[in-house]
Amino acid sequence: MRRFASRFVVTSPLILSGVLVALSACEDPRQAAEAENRSIVSEIIREAWNEGNLEVFPQFFASDFVYRDPAAPTATDLDSYRAFVSGILRRWPERSLTIEDMISENDKVVVKYEFRGVRSEGGTEEEPGTEATVSHPGIQIYRFSEGKVVELDDIWDALGAYQQAGYELVLSEGRDRQ
């Protein structure tokens, strides 16, 4: 009996690891899909936003992808979203998008993030360049279908970001100022 107890203590870590492997192999398919979706979102942020590699877009985004951002109303599909991100990468060469929180359920992943960047010199006629450092929070909601992002809603503090970059808020004429 003593030998059995000694043997059990020695082999129990092996038994425990075998049980853990068996349990992970029996993981709920929904949980596995949610974990995969979180991994894809992390990869998109790392590769596209932080590394500037937009070549990953076809790998992660569906061809019928829809983008919604009140601050960027012209970016609506994959091509215009790619152009939008490309413009940000060009104007903000020193940037990072940090995931502060990530929640997933079923086919959706929600990310709370913080964007930090230094605006490059130059700019465009519509957006003159500054050397301002900008930091703003945002929330992205990704929806997946068949392992690819089909929708992305992006809400961020555009007003705060533009003010930090040196822009002045000017109300246009003819607007009701109640």
Image: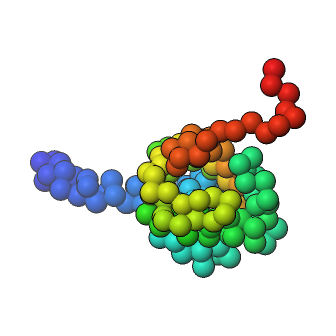
Q: Residue pushed farthest top?
A: 178
Q: Specify whether 114 is left or right of 63.
A: left
Q: x%, y% of residue 34? A: 61, 54
Residue 33 image-quadrant placement: bottom right
Q: Nearer the viewer, residue 77 or 122?
A: 122
Q: Report the colour scheme.
A: rainbow
Residue 102 in sight here: no
Q: Residue pushed farthest front?
A: 173
Q: x%, y% of residue 37? A: 61, 59
Q: Specify whether 153 is left or right of 2.
A: right
Figure check: 46 above or below 16: below
Figure check: 60 above or below 95: below
Q: Residue at x 68, y 76 (%)?
A: 58
Q: Residue at x 68, y 69 (%)?
A: 82
Q: Nearer the viewer, residue 58 or 8?
A: 58
Residue 69 in sight here: yes
Q: Specify whether 127 is left or right of 15.
A: right
Q: How many marks?
A: 0
Residue 86 image-quadrant placement: bottom right
Q: Residue at x 26, y 55 (%)?
A: 13
Q: Specify whether 157 is left or right of 144.
A: left
Residue 64 image-quadrant placement: bottom right
Q: x%, y% of residue 53? A: 54, 75
Q: Nearer the viewer, residue 51 or 26?
A: 51
Q: Residue at x 66, y 44 (%)?
A: 155
Q: x%, y% of residue 159? A: 62, 41
| Quarter of the figure with the C terminus | top right
Q: Residue pushed farthest bottom?
A: 55
